[in-house]
Amino acid sequence: MFQFRFSRGVLWSALFLTAVTGANAQTSSAQTPPESKRLSVGAIVGYPITGSSQEVSSSVNTSETTPPTVTDTLVESKGAPFTGGAAIRYDFSERFGAGADILHRRGGYNSTVIISEQITDGNSTADLLLSTFEETRAHLLDIPILGRYYFKDRSQGGGVRPYVTGGLALRFATGASSLSEIADQDQVTDTDLTTIGPANDSTLGGVLGFGLRAADDVGLKVDVEFRYTRWADPIFQSGPANSNNNQVDILVAFTF
């Protein structure tokens, strides 16, 4: 009799565990989307708020002679005003996901340095001693690999899901080109098309950002993201011209 009751208890326990396990499996299946809906691929476009190079504008007395020598420096960030490329996103769970982008941007700078004698009165003009101009451009390829955390479950339906994101990014510089012009006090100009190579043709950066995701019933997902990147090493570094190690972008990704 004891063995019968024990066997019946084991049977009922097994049936109870089976029922609970089945219910949990159904709940997990309902919460976890199929693989085809967890992975999305598409395009991304953005507007860089910061320039690819640091802006410099200065006028400094560089001698104690009479009249003194003045060095005027002007560095302007140049390049395409937009960035764009491919995007891939993957949702591990209701609130955790990851993504990677391949972003292309044309960046560079114009650098002008003029050394002259300072004007001492209103009837005289500055005497040019030396003028240098440099124009450098390069293709910048950024590959950020980021994790993200959503503040709203995926299964809660429509609406907007805010999230934070962070990770690492790789930057590569290719296709650099340069133009240099030097003019002396006799107004003789020498032009040189020799490419000034980048100080570093690759660098690593840390990325932080936040954004909003909206999705429709068809499967289109739109991510609007504000992203900050801090690069470890400068790509450009030539005289007064240096890459901007701080980068801020507004990005919009469309994925299916």
Image (tube, rainbow, N blue to C red):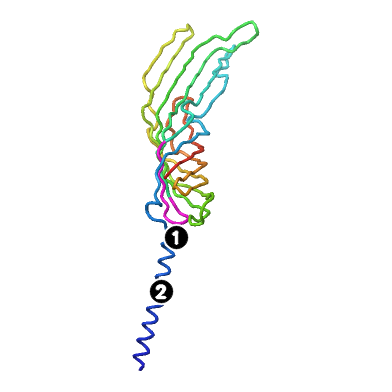
Q: Number of callouts in the render?
A: 2
Q: From the viewer's side, name the closer residue of 236 and 254.
A: 254
Secondary element at image label 2: helix
Q: Main secondary structure of the magenta part?
A: strand
Quarter-wise, where is residue 7 in the image? Answer: bottom left
Q: The disc labelled 2 sits on which kind of residue?
A: Ala
Q: Is residue 202 above or below residue 194?
A: below
Q: From the viewer's side, name the closer residue of 126 and 209.
A: 209
Badge 1: how crowded within 10 Å, few (<14), some, or many (20+)? Answer: some
Task: Name the residue tied to disc 1.
Answer: 31
Q: Position of residue 188 (x, y in %)?
A: 44, 7
Residue at image coords 37%, 86%: 8
Residue at image coords 36%, 88%: 6
Task: Name the residue tied to disc 2.
Answer: 19
Q: From the viewer's side, name the closer residue of 180 and 117.
A: 180
Look at the image and give the residue range highlighted in magenta: 85-97
Q: Position of residue 107 (x, y in %)?
A: 44, 28
The alpha-carbon separation of the residues under discs 1 and 2 comes to 18 Å
Q: Which residue extends farthest bottom?
A: 1
Q: From the viewer's side, name the closer residue of 84 and 230.
A: 84
Quarter-wise, where is residue 11 in the image? Answer: bottom left
Mark 1–mark 2 CB contact (< 8 Å)? no
